[in-house]
Amino acid sequence: MLELFEGPVPVEKTLARWYKEEDKSNYGAFIPFIGTIRDEDGIDGLSFDIYEPILNSWYEAWQKKAAEVGAILKMAHSKGDVPLHKSSYIAAVFSPKRRVALEMIDEFVEDFKASAPIWKYDLRDGKRIYAKDRSTAIKGSGLLSKVKDK
């Protein structure tokens, strides 16, 4: 399940709903990850743009990977502005065994940071400023990504 929210992710409601959806599924582990906007560098918050078609296909590939080990993934992310100390991202793994869930949440969150088509902007004084110094280029993206070195 992939959910997108305008503004902050409602963490408590979302995690409670996810838990309720799976409480009879016989999973032995429910491992959540909650990403929160930190007060740093004088920002007022962060803002996010998402390219949903690529995000959906990236997420579907992860769902298949999870299914191969008997697990499921759930994820929620913000679109638009998120103020300090609120969540922009939560993910969770449900699995029969804790080791599977612990390893998968780590791999999933790291791959999300490296591969998800989500662009981050600092919010400062009512303006959105692209956070280039804290962004990661998506593998295979860019005008020259198909050009081979000669």
Image: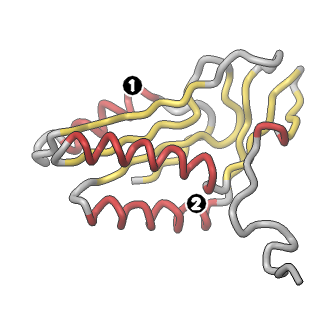
The x and y percentages for residue 96 are 16, 48
CB under 8 Å between discs 1 and 2:
no
The x and y percentages for residue 148 are 82, 81
Q: Is residue 140 left or right of residue 3?
A: right
Q: Is residue 42 left or right of residue 34?
A: right
Residue at which label 2 appears: 55
The x and y percentages for residue 63 are 37, 61
2 or 98, nearer to the observer: 98
98 or 80, nearer to the observer: 98
Question: Is the residue 46 above or below the residue 116 in the image?
Answer: above
Q: CA distance from mark 1 to mark 2?
A: 24 Å
Mark 1 or mark 2, earlier in chain: 1
111 or 42, nearer to the observer: 111
Give the number of the mark in front: 1 or 2: 2
Residue at which label 1 appears: 12
Within 10 angstroms of label 2, few (less than 14), some, or many (20 or more) residues? some
Disc 1 marks a residue whose amino acid type is Glu
Q: Quadrant of the C terminus?
A: bottom right
Q: Residue at x 10, y 46 (%)?
A: 26
Q: Quadrant of residue 139?
A: bottom right
Indicate the secondary structure of the residue bearing disc 2: helix
Within 10 angstroms of label 1, few (less than 14), some, or many (20 or more) residues? few
Question: Is the residue 116 above or below the residue 76 in the image?
Answer: below
Q: Residue at x 73, y 24 (%)?
A: 45
The x and y percentages for residue 59 are 48, 60
Q: Quadrant of residue 141?
A: bottom right
Indicate the secondary structure of the residue bearing disc 1: helix
Q: Is residue 57 left or right of residue 96?
A: right
Disc 2 marks a residue whose amino acid type is Leu
Q: Residue at x 23, y 44 (%)?
A: 21
Q: Is residue 116 left or right of residue 97?
A: right
